[in-house]
């Protein structure tokens, strides 16, 4: 019995010694020395395993708390040092061929996807060619791009990265972090120089908006004689409108962020009603922007109908009015039902615009609902007059007859439209 108790006491004492704070600190000293002395990745792996073991013991140890609550505990001190040693361990590793490949892949992507300026493209190409030469010298191989085109240079950079990691004619089995550490370090330095060279090469986005537009010829048509407005960009917009050149106006709309220029660009595009403006107007109209919706109506492209019908009954009278007008101007009968639904809107201005839009659509299915509006004595005269106008616009015999019946209506505006219908039927 007493022998068993003695053995338990011995084990407990041994465990307490192993988890003593000073002992744990000493073990961390050993790990630090092992990291400093490591010559291979395997040595660093062993040091990391020892560090993991110490960390586990620190978590398991019942270390005393400090007397002063503001004082850092031994557990906190040990944990902090473990984190520091992990950073040291990470810095001691490598470099690896994969590190070089990562830089090269990013450089290749940048070469392909960046829009370079006229001055920047030669600098970007030169940076890539310089690296390929350096890699060739370091590996005693030829890494030559198929041409001096950016895509070919990017492919050559990727080829170097693949070769040093996976192996190839120049490097059998890829570069080893222990045996080829100097070569990898030299390639990584060259790759960093490539990265710097690409960063320094001038990109399109480095230019100001005015510089970009000047390069693209935006200001070419402006001269001292025709420059009449301020800012000068406004002169360009007015010249473009006069010359029926919507592309220059769209170009300005995409570049300039001022409300003043945006308003003038959209006004010009509304007056032109050019198909070239459809994409940008349609994109912006999806955000319920009323000026852009107006332009879509002037363009008259049926591709806008699917978007606009969603706004026709939106409980937003200003938006509904401009949308209904645009749908009428576009003239697609696909919009008839959505427009007709707006005849029941709570707002008279919306009902009136819906009636007029149906007239512009010219769909004979609208004759009956328009006739019902005209026959509704409780409806406002403005809305009834719009319904009569719409029937005249539809212009079939049945539509004209429905309107002509009201040539003695109490509302003068309704009479006017009814008389037009009567004259049309008589002719």
Image (cartoon, rainbow, N blue to C red):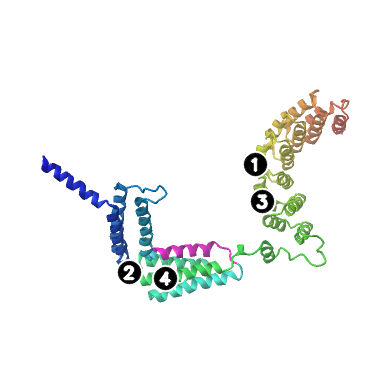
Label 4's element?
Answer: helix
Residue 109 belongs to magenta span? yes
Mark 4 Cα within 10 Å, few/some/many (few <14, many 20+)?
many
User: In terms of sequence position, does the residue under pointer 3 or pointer 4 come before the other?
Assistant: 4
Q: Disc 2 designates what residue?
A: 172
Examine the image and state in which quarter residue 190 appears: bottom left
Residue matched to label 1: 307
Q: Along the line of sight, which residue is nearer the eye, 66 or 210?
A: 66
C-beta proximity under 8 Å, tags 3 and 4: no
Image position, residue 263 (x, y; %): 74, 51
Q: Earlier in the sequence, mark 3 or mark 2?
A: 2
Nearer-N-terminus badge (4/2): 2
- What is the C-alpha distance between the residues marked 2 and 1? 59 Å
Residue drawn at x 51%, y 66% as measured from the top left: 151
Q: Which residue is the site of mark 3?
A: 280
Which label sits on residue 32?
A: none
Residue 210 occupies which quadrant of the picture?
A: bottom right
Residue 359 x, y percent position in the rendering? 77, 35
Q: Is residue 204 left or right of residue 50?
A: right
* Left/right of residue 249 with respect to residue 182 in the rendered view: right
Proximity of marks 3 and 1: CB atoms separated by less than 8 Å: no
Instruction: Considering the whole magenta stretch, tell me its main secondary structure.
Output: helix
Q: How many marks?
A: 4
Q: Which residue is mark 4?
A: 187
**Which segment did they paint magenta?**
98-116
């Amino acid at each position: 019995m007493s022998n068993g108790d003695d053995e338990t006491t011995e084990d407990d004492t041994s465990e307490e010694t192993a988890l003593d704070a000073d002992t744990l600190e000493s073990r961390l000293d050993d790990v630090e020395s092992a990291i400093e002395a490591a010559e291979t990745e395997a040595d660093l792996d062993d040091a990391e395993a020892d560090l993991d073991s110490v960390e586990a013991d620190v978590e398991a140890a019942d270390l005393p708390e400090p007397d002063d609550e503001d004082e850092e505990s031994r557990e906190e001190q040990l944990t902090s040092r473990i984190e520091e040693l992990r950073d040291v361990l990470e810095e001691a590793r490598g470099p690896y061929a994969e590190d070089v490949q990562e830089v090269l892949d990013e450089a290749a992507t940048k070469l392909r996807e960046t829009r370079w300026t006229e001055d920047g493209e030669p600098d970007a190409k030169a940076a890539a060619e310089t690296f390929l030469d350096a890699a060739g010298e370091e590996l005693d191989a030829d890494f030559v791009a198929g041409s001096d085109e950016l895509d070919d240079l990017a492919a050559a950079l990727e080829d170097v990265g693949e070769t040093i990691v996976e192996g190839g004619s120049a490097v059998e089995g890829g570069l080893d972090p222990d045996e080829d550490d100097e070569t990898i370090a030299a390639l990584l330095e060259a790759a960093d120089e490539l990265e710097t060279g690409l960063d320094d090469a001038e990109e399109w986005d480095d230019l100001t908006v005015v510089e970009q537009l000047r390069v693209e010829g935006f200001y070419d048509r402006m001269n001292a004689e025709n420059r009449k407005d301020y800012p000068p960009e406004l002169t360009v917009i007015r010249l473009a409108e006069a010359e029926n050149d919507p592309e220059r106006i769209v170009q300005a709309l995409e570049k300039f962020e001022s409300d003043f220029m945006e308003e003038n660009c959209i006004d010009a595009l509304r007056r032109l009603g050019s198909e070239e403006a459809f994409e940008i107007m349609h994109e912006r109209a999806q955000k319920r922007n009323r000026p852009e919706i107006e332009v879509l109506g002037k363009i008259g492209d049926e591709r806008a109908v699917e978007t606009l019908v969603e706004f026709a009954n939106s409980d937003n009278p200003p938006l509904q009015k401009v949308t209904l007008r645009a749908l009428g101007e576009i003239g697609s009968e696909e919009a008839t039902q959505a427009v007709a639904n707006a005849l029941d809107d709570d707002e008279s201005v919306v009902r009136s615009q819906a009636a007029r839009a149906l007239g512009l659509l010219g769909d004979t299915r609208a004759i009956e609902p328009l006739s019902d509006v005209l026959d509704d004595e409780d409806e406002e005269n403005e809305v009834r007059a719009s319904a009569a106008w719409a029937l005249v616009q539809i212009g079939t015999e049945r539509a004209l007859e429905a309107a002509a019946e009201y040539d003695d209506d109490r509302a003068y505006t309704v009479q006017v439209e009814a008389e037009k219908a009567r004259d049309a039927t008589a002719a």
